[in-house]
Amino acid sequence: MAKPIILTVDDDPEVLRAIERDMRRQYGSEYRVIRANSGASAIDTLKQLKLRNDAVALLLSDQRMPQMSGIDFLEQAQEYYPEAKRALLTAYADTDAAIGAINTARVDYYLMKPWDPPDQQLYPVINDLLDDWRAHFRPPFDGIRVIGHRWSAQTYQIKDFLARNQIPYQSLDIEIDPEAKHLLEMADVDQSQLPLVLFGNGTSMPAPTNIQIAEQIGLQTRAEKPFYDLLIVGGGPSGLAAAVYGASEGLRTVLVEREAPGGQAGTSSRIENYLGFPSGLSGGDLARRAVAQARRFGVEILTPQEVSNLRLDGPYRIVTLADGSEISCHALLVATGVSYRKLNVPGIDKLIGAGVYYGAAVTEAIANSGEDVYIVGGANSAGQAAIYLANYARKVVLLVRGEGLAKSMSNYLIERIEKTDNMEVWPYTNVTEVHGDQALEAITIHNSQTNEDQKVPTTGLFLFIGAQPRTDWLGDTVERDQNGFILSGNDLLQEGKRPKDWQLDRDPYLLETSIPGIFVAGDVRSGSIKRVASGVGEGSIAVQFVHRYLASI
Ligand SMILES: Cc1cc2nc3c(=O)[nH]c(=O)nc-3n(C[C@H](O)[C@H](O)[C@H](O)COP(=O)(O)OP(=O)(O)OC[C@H]3O[C@@H](n4cnc5c(N)ncnc54)[C@H](O)[C@@H]3O)c2cc1C
């Protein structure tokens, strides 16, 4: 945490220098001593400090100043730092006013000028005030603050981006948090410009994009070099594993990730079946460890950055990024995973992020404390989310189309669900309508056995339905199956024949696509297992074939 601040105020430059010098000599190791030459400029300084969430311990002001007196300044300062200690420096003639101010402006002490020797006239009083301040001081949150409406989709999207990139933040709800309104005024932003993001360096950004946030917090979004041996698209488990193996084996490696490293696994509250973690680990933890490992080996991770196009030029595979820039490579690995299928029911679109979420149980769990929430889906991801949400919600209901969970969910999760008191499974059900204007208020559930509809109030609907590959950006380059998953290796051989435009005198390697040097790993591969471990395995195996390919060009 940055040092707490002592602010000294005086309009006489000589006195100001002297008090600042004496304060710094005695307190400089523990406090930052700063100065202002008028009440107005001291108030401006306090506003800036408040926006940066710095702690202010003591305000030490001269009483007799033009425009704004010391008492007036200390009175106004209460609005920004009510907990800071306040002391007046007065000449003998002002003592009556100073004594009065102890009551009216809640001034803690008045000190007489001159204060020589400071060991006797200044420090004992200041020590006492600072001890008292420390005793009640709670360090302010030392990171990014997001101010917005609880049910705003844009606020949710910013919080989700920060959480998935492992950036600590504090969320302030404009409707219930008085501090939020105050900060808005100080940043000179009105409610129509929300969400407002305040950074630790005092910068404030109304409604920033992910890229703007990324640049402000120092995430890398542009490649350092024009060319790499290996370019990986997608930073889920498959892409991260390939990055670690590729870079550790000497390949110049860059990874491009459009949201946050970790992929789907990064959104999981607890992965219990990944080898080596007997009590499970959260997806966020797995992602953080993998990113650190990849960076240690020198992988460049560009995020948030999206690959939007691929073209071929002789031995070069060239991708275009969403910002229009291009990166060239010899070997390309597509590890773009899958995303949830959208639920198309009336009323849903405008409430995404405002009570309706695709995945995202972790970030929204606290916001649903004490509420009834519904989860759609019967696979492991839905089960994990249900167990996690049950720690916060009053009741969690799993809505499944079929007769139960046995066919689609692992046993260990089914057992945990059965043992959790505030959890119910409603078989033969699906959501047919979503209700709410600004935020989710209710959903209509259809029961296919009884053919009945019921409308239930809720604040949270979490959707975990099916998987769709993200391969549109590949255009008509690599071959895919009828569902858009990428074909590779032997799956490309039809009756022993190689792919249409394949010109090499060998079959495609395992995990190699219909274009030499372009590989695929993880959930986006046709026939993949869709597990963290299998993605990690495929990502690392792909690198072995990348080496073989590179040796041949
Ligand atoms: C909530 C949940 C819980 C799960 N729990 C488990 C579990 O306990 N055990 C288990 O084994 N498996 C679990 N899974 C499945 C597992 O997470 C996936 O199988 C695994 O993440 C697949 O990894 P991947 O790298 O292939 O793809 P993904 O994880 O889907 O990652 C792909 C990445 O590519 C990025 N991307 C996509 N398109 C582009 C583009 N054009 N440009 C740049 N980047 C792009 C995406 O943003 C994404 O980050 C769970 C899945 C979910 C959703």
Image (cartoon, rainbow, N blue to C red):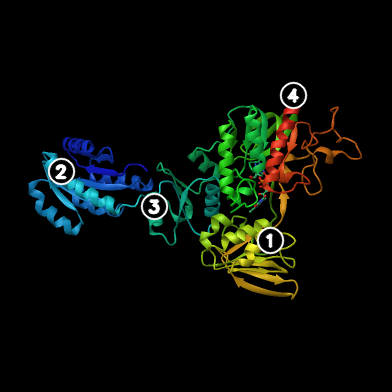
Residue type, numbered disc 4: Ala
Q: Are marks 4 and 3 in contact (CB under 8 Å)?
A: no
Mark positioned earlier in the residue sequence (2 or 4): 2
Identify the mark at residue 122; answer none if there is no mark. Answer: 2
Mark positioned earlier in the residue sequence (3 or 1): 3
Which residue is identified by label 3? 183
Query: Is 249 positioned to the left or the right of 20 in the image?
Result: right
Identify the mark at residue 377; answer none if there is no mark. Answer: 1
Query: Is 506 positioned to the left or the right of 534 in the image?
Result: right
Identify the mark at residue 551; answer none if there is no mark. Answer: 4
Mark positioned earlier in the residue sequence (1 or 4): 1
Q: Identify the secondary structure beneath mark 2.
A: loop
Which quadrant of the figure contains the C terminus? top right
Residue type, numbered disc 3: Leu
Residue type, numbered disc 1: Gly
Q: Residues within 10 Å of mark 3 (few under 14, many from 20)?
A: many
